[in-house]
Amino acid sequence: MNTRVLTNPQLLTDQSRATARAVLDGERKGWRAAFAFAGPAVIASIAYMDPGNFATNIQAGAKYGYGLLWVVLLANVVAMVFQALSAKLGIVTGKNLAEMCRDQFPKPVVWLLWGVSEIAAMATDLAEFLGGAIGFSLLLNVPLMVGMAITAILSYGLLSLERFGFRPLELAIGLLVAIIGLSYIAELFVAPIHWAGVGAGLTTPHLADAGALTLAVGIIGATVMPHALFLHSGLTQNRTPSKGVEEKRTLIRFSNRETFIALAFAGFVNMAMVAVAAAAFHAGASDVAEIETAYKTLTPLLGGAAASVFLLSLIASGLSSSTVGTMAGQMVMQGFVGFRIPVLLRRLITMIPAFIVVWLGADATHSLVLSQVVLSVALPAPMIALLLFTGRRALMGPFVNGRALQWGAGVAAAAILALNGVLIAQALGCEIPGFPS
């Protein structure tokens, strides 16, 4: 059987479906049974470890030390809640978030949401392609444009695994997630982390100046991702068909566990990024704010091995996140307007802005941070839609959000809206009482 699995990747998907059905039928039990349901949250979690996170986290650590760790922690908690809601929507209704928007909202609203989502998809691809391109450019000592071409080809190769079923692609993405995580675990042992500073940064909310506010919004945009909210519901909607309320309840329970574990791991990676940047750059090299400079500076500070591990994690992040971004873009387009385009064409369309940025000679890392701010501005739309749907008993039945969950998630969405409003007002030259300018 193992030989057949290796020669026929579709069998990996078939075996996962058969195992999941056996668990729902009560024929399989134990902790290993959970692996049959694992995958959707792992794929969604890569959106929380993409090159945009590298850019915002390096800048946060280099400029403000451990001072913005509380933003990373808070954003990660919010991400857990909303990703769990997204997965639940797909399991209960059998539709993804984009399809629900198309069915429930008036057409003008649907077209507006689609436009906002496509802008977010392009901002996502901008971050992912630039991150992968920077990694390959530094590794192979080639121009950034060549690095982007390599990233495009390899990410398309990863996407081609989807035709063999969901399991081969999930395993490939899971391997890249593991590479990113292990890389930063290794970095924590090399960098001189000030653990008391980490504790203070996690528990003491503070924004030092307007730059800190911009980075805080960028961190939120890089952590709670609009395309991941759309994608997660699509990954769960038809993955394991259920026969009734109790089976749906079982699927939601497995989904919630996986979401917590996958996003806790992603949150740890993000906090490790900030901590390593703070330890390496903040005290003596606070001007380090670019990924390229960070890589070159790590060698004399922490050694060549640390710099190489950093580069490996960046490349793994760029490849995996660009693949997941294209999957999400396809799902958004199909859900909102009801048609698909070839994956290759989708990839070409959404990566055009990234090529334009490089062709114009714009600062790559600064563009990455700005792309995350764009994502944060686009984020409230899917968050509000998700709250509306999962809080509606007519759609969710016994799985409707409880009052505490609905209000808590609503406060989080309102806070992000407020932060975005402050950022936009400050960009227009307005002074906001109580906020640094």
Image (tube, helix red, strand yellow):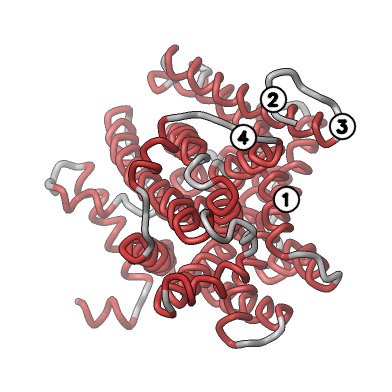
Q: Quadrant of residue 389?
A: top right
Q: Can you tell which of label 2 and label 4 is closer to the viewer?
A: 4
Question: What whole-number distance in Å separates the C-alpha atoms at marks 1 and 3?
Answer: 18 Å
Q: Which residue is mark 4?
A: 208
Q: Which residue is mark 3?
A: 429
Upstream in the sequence, badge 1 or badge 3?
Answer: 1
Question: From this viewpoint, is residue 141 visible?
Answer: yes
Q: Which residue is mark 1?
A: 370
Question: What whole-number distance in Å separates the C-alpha atoms at marks 2 and 4?
Answer: 9 Å
The amino acid marked with disc number 3 is: Gly
Residue 292 drawn at (x, y percent): 62, 71
Question: What whole-number distance in Å separates the C-alpha atoms at marks 3 and 4?
Answer: 18 Å
Q: Quadrant of the N terminus?
A: bottom left
Upstream in the sequence, badge 2 or badge 1?
Answer: 1
The amino acid marked with disc number 1 is: Leu
Upstream in the sequence, badge 2 or badge 4?
Answer: 4
